[in-house]
Image (cartoon, grey):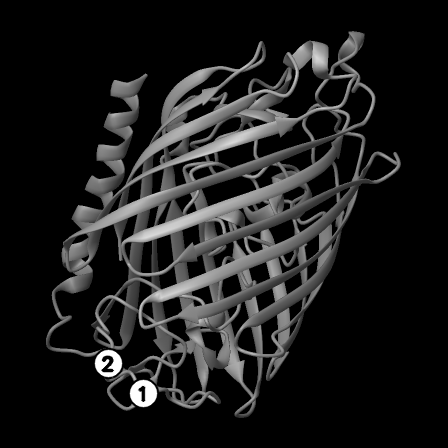
Amino acid sequence: MAARSLAALSVGVSLFAVAQPVFAQDHAAHPMPMPRASAQPAHDMSSMDQTDHFMPGMVHGDQPMTSPLGPWSMTRDASGTSWQPERSEHAGIHTMRGDWSFMTHALLNLTYDGQNGPRGESQTFVSGMVMTSARRDFDDGSTLNLRAMVSPDPFMGKRGYPLLLAAGETADGVNTLVDRQHPHDLFMELSASYAHQLSDTDSVFAYVGLPGEPAFGPPAFMHRLSAMDSPEAPITHHWLDSTHIVFGVATLGWVHDTFKLEASTFKGREPDQDRYDIERPELDSWSVRASWNPSPEWSLQTSYADVKSPEQLSPDEDDTKWSASAIHTRRIGTDGWWSTTLAWGAKAHGGDEATHAFALESAFSPDVRWTVFARAERTETGELLELPGGAHGPVYAVGKVSIGAIRDWRVSDHVRFGLGALFAINAVPDGLEPSYGGDPDGGMICMRLKID
């Protein structure tokens, strides 16, 4: 398994190695101009290394970097069309080729995972993403943006990796995946957006993806600054942001300054167990989301989704989902940052009473070398015990607390290598203790390659 994971890591790095020279060949001769002016004032960046850090209001030449969706700082953008605080980092290799600008970055983890107790397992796996985008700005104030993201997750195998108290989707089309995190598909996003600026503070946009992310929940966990350094997926994933990769999504949005309102139609069914294909789009579900960034340090959202037949094993049952979250990010000194997310999600499946999930996560990076991260979660789930006939068992409230750190070393201008570890404690009620052997713990050790 370790050899297989190393081979997967090599594939991901090779994909980037092939792509990067194409994007980089005109980089030195063409600094990154941004045709549209931002409503944000430009900050003084004279004391910063602009090659390695992309801060709120960062400028190339005389122009600030703006979002492809409207006249605000690019640092406000997260996964799909979601928002994060503008104090967030925005890292990537930015290049120009004719009228097009490109951005590329990658994050790949090679992880050893050990989960203890009678339901725990050990495994070595590769996870992460390689992402690139191409942008074209027009004289009338409109912008076309194309984005692609691929993941090495399918190389884990269909059953993903061990993660106690996680449940959701199916590995084989027959059984629910329990105490394991499912792998994402090879193609995590293939999307296009078109935005038109109405004024210095207003814009409208359209976003389509196959796959893509509809307007629901906070940014997906691998894109949240408070979560992206952890090699462990949250067990609250299926309440908060599991719709981040659906095969068919169309979103329309309107933005006024710090407020955004958007609506999506999308395919409700979660991706099947074939992780390498592109599935047929069926726009049978819908969602709405309101986002507000009251200051550069804060990002708030609330959202609702009506999801048609999400589970392959219960095709006649629909979901209704609610979500609310608050993200706070502040800068620490010249290079550091501290980001915290508090999120709540509720899910009612097949007319059952809604179950709830809460997550509080935080990551602190005093400089470019160290990042410390922690997460506390609580979910209500009936999927951890299966009754005869495949029916779900009683609903239990379970919890997990994890803490970890990663140390990075800069290998070159755009490449960092890191070593990290985390430790997690799981809390189960009396009804689950015989199955789990009490409150089991677990841990992960990882090597990371970050290209930005």
Q: State the residue at coordinates (20%, 62%).
A: 23
Asked if marks 2 and 1 touch (Cβ < 8 Å), the reply is yes
Residue indicated by mark 2: 47
Secondary structure under badge 2? loop
Q: The residue tagged with tag 1: helix, strand or loop?
A: loop
Q: Quadrant of residue 150?
A: top left
Q: Closest to the observer: 314 or 84?
A: 84
Quarter where residue 33 is shown: bottom left
With 12 as the anchor, is 410 left or right in this view? Answer: left
Could you say where residue 151 lies in the image, as x and y percent from the top left? 38, 40
Residue 426 in view, yes or no: yes
**Viewer-nearest residue: 349 or 46:** 46
Measured as percent of width and height from the top left, residue 235 is found at 61, 35
The answer to whether residue 450 is above or below residue 93 is: above
Residue drawn where x is 29% and y is 71% of the image: 101
| 300 lies left or right of 224 | right
Q: Which residue is mark 1?
A: 44
x, y percent for residue 350: 84, 34
Q: CA distance from mark 2 to mark 1?
A: 8 Å
Q: Position of residue 324 (x, y in %)?
A: 71, 58
